[in-house]
Image (cartoon, rainbow, N blue to C red):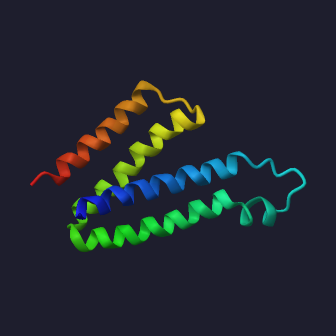
Amino acid sequence: MKYLILIAGILANASASILIKYAVSNSSGIGQSFYQKFLLNPTLIGGVILYGVAFLLYTIALSKFPLNIAHPLLTSGSIAMVAFASVVGFGEKMSYLNMIGVLLIIIGVIALTVR
């Protein structure tokens, strides 16, 4: 059960970032006020809500895991998911060096969490 909290936290955090990127990428702003462009944007609001959910899951994870395990797992998992989604969902480029960087982050977190 406690690992499901970590997975849900990673998914919520990464999904929030992806939704917010989508919201700001798909609004031209022509003829729209700041209020219309951002504050009434349901995709942006969904991303903000998911950040709140991610925060709640983070606090629950901290009650179940040591800080030096929960935080690296949640952040690195989110980094990896967002990196993947940026390529697949937004057509952003990722060099081999970027891929190696993500892999090193994951390896580093595994090294931190091994007891």
- Any part of residue 32 in sight: yes
Left or right, 91 with reference to 8: right
The residue shown at (29%, 68%) is 61
Position of 102 with respect to 95 (left or right) is: left
Residue 57 located left or right of residue 107: right
Quadrant of the drawing holding the N terminus: bottom left
Q: Quadrant of residue 54?
A: bottom left
Task: Confirm whether residue 71 shows in the render.
Answer: no
* Depth check, front residue: 54 or 95: 54
Q: Position of residue 2 (x, y in %)?
A: 24, 64
- Where the C terminus falls, by quadrant? bottom left
Which residue is situated farthest in the top direction here? 96
Horizontal and vertical percent position of residue 66: 20, 67
Q: Is residue 61 left or right of residue 38?
A: left
Residue at image coords 41%, 25%:
96
Q: Residue 31 location in percent, x, y?
A: 90, 54
Q: Residue at x 52, y 57 (%)?
A: 16
Residue lying farthest to the front in this orientation = 1
Q: How many marks?
A: 0
| Residue with the most extreme right position | 31
Instruction: Find residue 32 and report its horizontal and vertical position in percent.
Output: 86, 57
Residue for point 42% across, 44% down: 81
